[in-house]
Image (cartoon, rainbow, N blue to C red):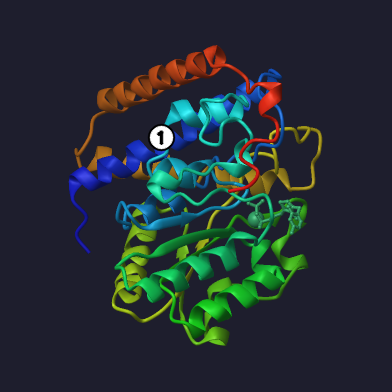
Amino acid sequence: MKISNDDKIKMLWEMMRIRQFEERAGELYVAGIITGALHASNGQEAVPVGVIMNLKEDDYLQSSHRGHGHVLAKGGEFKPMMAELFGKITGYCKGRGGSMHFAYVEKNILGTNGIVGGGIPIAAGVGYSIVYKGTNQMVACFLGDGAANTGAFHEGINFAAVVNAPVLFVIENNQWAISVPRKWSDRLVDLSKRAAAYGILGETVDGNDVLAVYEAANKAVKEIRAGNGPVLLECKTYRWKGHHAGEPASLQYRDPKEVEAWLKKCPIKKLEKALLEEKIISEAEIEEMTKKIEQELDEAVEFAKKSPLPEAASLHDHLYV
Ligand SMILES: Cc1ncc(C[n+]2csc(CCOP(=O)(O)OP(=O)(O)O)c2C)c(N)n1
Ligand SMILES: [Mg+2]
């Protein structure tokens, strides 16, 4: 498959935006400026970027608890995202949701989700609504390997299959569910094999290779848009940081050698290397991109700091529609 140079540069840009956002959010968390729960996706950037670059503006995104990258790749902006992390009224959910409840309905971003597997039946339902209304949209639903072992996974994907819902279920297999390694929770090597149980297509791909993710997602999206129902795409990747930003560094349940080996498989470095070798981009241009993103992040943090907190009197607002 031929991917244009412009698209490859866009992939690098989008992955860099996610990485730098996560780095900054992590620093603010450790400094005690951001509170609540925060799950960083450093190391997993190729998955949202490779998948979401195949979506159209009006397609839906259903995200997980580790969802900053999904939201950014779907058009989320630094300012309202940062403000949401700060609990300010200028945030996407008026400061009431935080990291695990980023929702931006104007861009069909249905939300990150604190309930593991909770997004799967929602995506199936939204997919069914698309079938019902006959619009040419689809849903991308991101979930973790741990979420693949919830009852919601079976119910949600089976339902989506039966009603032929246009949903791309993406398992971000980062090898761990908190402190539980994959091999303690099931015996499958490739989680995409589960697709057969629902009579749908499934594929496993290197989740640290954004071009491979893009190609696999492109193929899946074509099937879905052709009316062939949901597809299950497993992207094998790795979580670089602790399960959440507050996890003490002293907590060592992972073999440091395993972590080190995966750090060497950085999805951003991999694409950078390819683009430099092909002379599609220069070191100076990458440096320039990094600076631009940092500056945009500085502005977002400033915006979040200056924004007001919600008024106490508004505590009961927005609970019912
Ligand atoms: C229904 C439910 N059960 C348990 C939890 C606690 N919990 C939060 S994240 C997590 C692990 C999720 O693992 P995975 O799906 O692999 O995602 P990852 O954190 O690795 O991205 C668990 C068990 C929860 N939030 N929701
Ligand atoms: Mg996991």
**Whether residue 39 can be seen here:** yes
Q: Quadrant of residue 285?
A: top left
Q: Please, is residue 43 above or below residue 308 in the view?
A: below
Q: Position of residue 157 (x, y in %)?
A: 56, 75
Residue drawn at x 54%, y 54% is 237
Q: Secondary structure at mark 1?
A: helix
Q: Quadrant of residue 244?
A: top right
Q: Quadrant of ligand 1?
A: bottom right
**Position of 2 compared to 56: left or right?**
left
Question: Badge 1 local density, few (<14 within 10 Å), some, or many (20+)?
Answer: some
Residue tagged by mark 1? 16
**Position of 269 compared to 236: left or right?**
left
Using the image as rendered, state which of residue 109 and residue 55 is in the foreground.
Answer: 109
Q: Position of residue 82 (x, y in %)?
A: 53, 27
Residue type, numbered disc 1: Met
Q: Please, is residue 170 above or below residue 311 in the view?
A: below
Residue drawn at x 70%, y 68% is 150
Q: Quadrant of the N terminus?
A: bottom left
Q: Position of residue 40 (x, y in %)?
A: 60, 39
Q: Position of residue 295 (x, y in %)?
A: 39, 17
Using the image as rendered, state which of residue 150 and residue 216 is in the foreground.
Answer: 150
Q: Please, is residue 89 above or below residue 237 in the view?
A: above
**Whether residue 45 can be seen here:** no
Q: Quadrant of residue 136?
A: bottom left
Residue drawn at x 53%, y 30% is 91
Residue drawn at x 74%, y 32% is 246
The mark total stands at: 1
